[in-house]
Image: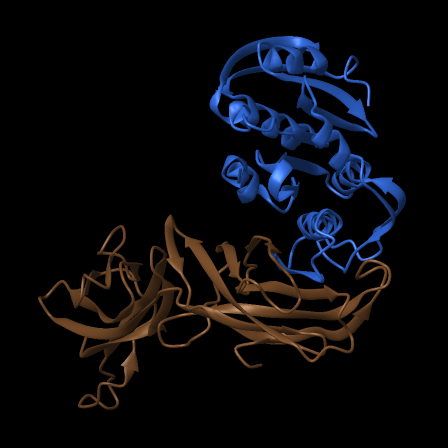
Chain colours: A brown, B blue
Amino acid sequence: MCGSYLAGAATATFAVGSTGTLGPIAAQTCTAYDPNACSGQSYGTGGGYSYNWSSNNTNIATISGSSTNPSGTFLGKSGGTAIGQGVIANGTGCAFVADGTLAVQVPTASRITQNINNQAISGSPYCQAGIAGWLRVVNKIVTDQNHTDMVVGGQTLTEQVTLPQPNAFGISQAKIGTATTNAQGLFQDTFYLCSSLCPSSTAKVGATQTISDSLNGHNYTLTNNSLVYSCSSITVNGQ
Amino acid sequence: MDLQKQTISTSVDTSIMRALTNLGNDRRIPIGIVLEPGNPHQLCEENRQVTIRDRPISDFIDKLLAHSNYAWSVNDGVIVIRPAHVTDHLNRVLNIRFDRFGGIQTTMQGLGIVLNTWVYSRLHPEAKGYGGDILSSLDADQFPHFEVRDASVEQILNKIVTLGSKGMWLFQLDKDFEHNRNVDLHTYSYKDDANALQGICSAISY
């Protein structure tokens, strides 16, 4: 044995409270036709080797379960990046190291991934008879502390929408829903306004949307979104 | 729905609300609950120990609601649980009629949110509009063609929770309704809103 490498994942991106896996780590060997190079790769990852995994920052990620498997599984403790280090050794005391990157994500904000519907509405079935407004439907995803999408299913989302009182449309309450992200980390958000002032009014009403994300037993309040309701558009953070 | 013919064997030691939610979810039985104004937390706060074996579901519900302020009936295929004494205000709001109720393409929970805004609009004619924001799961069932004609609020709620995988509705009147005319209603799908149903008591806002 003359070296080691990560035969599997060299980077693991996972949410706080979840686990991610590096490896497996494998040995490199010398070959008879070029004994001074360390380019040969051993077949298989077991048999005759021992393994040991560790994290260089246990505040961010710690070993989850056994540290002596060919692959290293880590538990996210807080947001950030750490190095997961695997050591492979043979029976003669020869050992080599291979490092991987552990990126631990914390739910921080949300962003629109796709516009599904963005249209003027009037009367039934959208509004009550005689009044009109606007409908906006978007797909969204939660993003982490580095603005990277969190492809994590099972996040439970609740929200609050705060409207200034009074406001031009006389809306005193915006009713809200709850959601769970799918396997791609996506959820849907539907905004609508119905008003007797529409479609002619040019009034705009700003609102603040606060989404709370429950993930692995922890609650995170995402960065507020700025909503603007009007007869001719509904925008989210200016989009 | 003949609750005399459907039998149940179970043993519960939990709040009335949790027992009802579990019953509805396990059997996919639509349930509606009208909370008692002024004492809306009774169903969440009172525990019941009930053990029953091969008895009609109706017996189980009777035991759950015994010594509470609530009675039950089956309306439009929905078990509706309401205060034994229904106030005039409650009756008036539950019987508000709409010539035609439809909605945007949305989920069972979303339909309840839309209905909530329609009721709000009817009770607050001085308001020039209403709006909503509906978070939903992409995997949730959507009901794009839902429409009910000439129906009361309660009938619309019953229609909503008999859709798809069935669900539960919760209706409450603000204890100061006489002054602020505020009501709150929620609809939950057993399939899509399991988390919200687990926390249904936190939805009691008045």
Q: Position of residue A138 (x, y in %)?
A: 64, 70
Q: Is residue A217 left or right of residue A207?
A: left
Q: Position of residue A111 (x, y in %)?
A: 51, 73
**Front residue of this view, candidates B124 and A34:** B124
Q: Quadrant of residue B173?
A: top right
| Residue B20 in sight in this render | yes
**Front residue of this view, candidates A98 and B34:** B34
**Front residue of this view, candidates A151 and B195:** B195
Q: Is residue A226 left or right of residue B84?
A: left
Q: Position of residue A131 (x, y in %)?
A: 81, 65
Residue in view at x 16 percent, y 73 percent: A96
Q: Is residue A210 left or right of residue B94?
A: left
Residue in view at x 68 percent, y 71 percent: A136
- Above-or-below relation of A96 to A74: below
Q: Position of residue A202 (x, y in %)?
A: 69, 80
**Front residue of this view, candidates A236 and A36:** A236
Tally of numbered discs: 0
